[in-house]
Image (cartoon, rainbow, N blue to C red):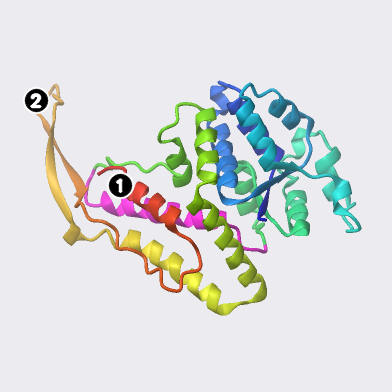
Amino acid sequence: MSRVTVDNWTLINSLSLLGGSTNKFQNKSMRLCMSNLLTGIMLWDEIIWVPNRGTKLLLDALQDENAKCSLREILNPINLVDFGELELTSENINSLFFSENARDRLNRVEAYLNLSNTLHINYFPHPERATYMMEKNMFEKRFNRHKIMEGMDKDIANYYHELTSDSRYNLLRFTYPLLYDYIRKGAVSPLDELSVALELRHRKDVVEFRKTLIVYEEALQKGNRPIIVAVQKQLNELSESISNLHSKEKMETRTMQLGITLPIIGGGVNVPIIKKMKEKAKPLNEKEAVLNLTFLTELRDFGIGKFD
């Protein structure tokens, strides 16, 4: 079973949204936290969290019983007693369980990393903590599944950058993380987003994707070169299937007459629009495949087809 640690800062913001919070000042941060939570639900079997009174109160207060029950099945609170004979009584890790001081939010990054390293699982930090980790050059020592999604985000972003590079007007917009964008496409509320993520979580190809990721992670731990090379080839092919779509031979430029009248010049404004030709991405080579990339391929097609 695959597990990931998600911090209480992330959970509190996400549960606040699910509970109906309309705090516009914190909305962007809450949305990023919601994206992290839903990504955790999709990519891992279980989410580990450190018991916290605020998180528990928000979870218990959810009005939607289905959402509450589903989250309780996925969110697994961990206790100090679960550490058994391991030497985990350091002040650093204990602070996660006993400190109520909000000013320690960024400083607790090291404690969460230590906790996750001890449990041999990934840590999915709050967005502000993720930024803090990058600034301080604090990185996990193991492969993180989320990096696959980040890689696809960058590939799609680069694709749209190239798509509009010939125009003075960047009229195409790519919203990422792509996975969150995909989940939100038919949702009208945070509870809807959770419902979509839970449904996708149990879809056969997504379940297989998580299972095959375990195979890859075990190969990395044991140094199984054939499997590592095979997975890297798959991921490279997925990346290339996006980047290869953009070439000048596959693009056409057309002009759109906008109904804008300028007070001095008068008349319309001709704005060049770059539009990609209708062409499917090349199918991936699935021979000797390790990862089940059916869902990622669907995600790719969603990303590159948003403005067809």
**In this image, 189 relative to 56: left or right?**
left
Return the x and y of residue 152 as percentages of the image width and height.
Answer: 44, 55
Residue 78: quadrant of the picture: top right
Question: Relative to 290, does residue 102 appear above or below in the rendering?
Answer: above
- From the image, give the main secondary structure of the stretch colored magenta: helix
Q: Which residue is mark 2?
A: 266
Is residue 154 located in the magenta-colored stretch of the structure? Answer: yes
Q: Rounded to the nearest whole Å, what is the CA distance between mark 2 and mark 1? A: 36 Å
Q: Nearer the viewer, residue 87 or 62?
A: 62
Element at label 1: loop
Quadrant that contains the C terminus:
top left
User: Circle 1: is it few (<14), some (14-19), or many (20+) Cα within 10 Å?
Assistant: few
Q: Residue at coordinates 63% horizontally, 50% vertically from top-left? A: 45
Identify the magenta region: 141-168
Amino acid residing under circle 1: Gly
Q: Position of residue 112 (x, y in %)?
A: 74, 49
* Kind of element beneath mark 2: loop
Q: Is residue 20 magenta?
A: no
Label 2 crowd bin: few (<14), some (14–19), many (20+), radius 10 Å: few
Residue designated by label 1: 305
The image quadrant where one finds the N terminus is bottom right
Is 186 or 87 nearer to us in this picture?
Answer: 186
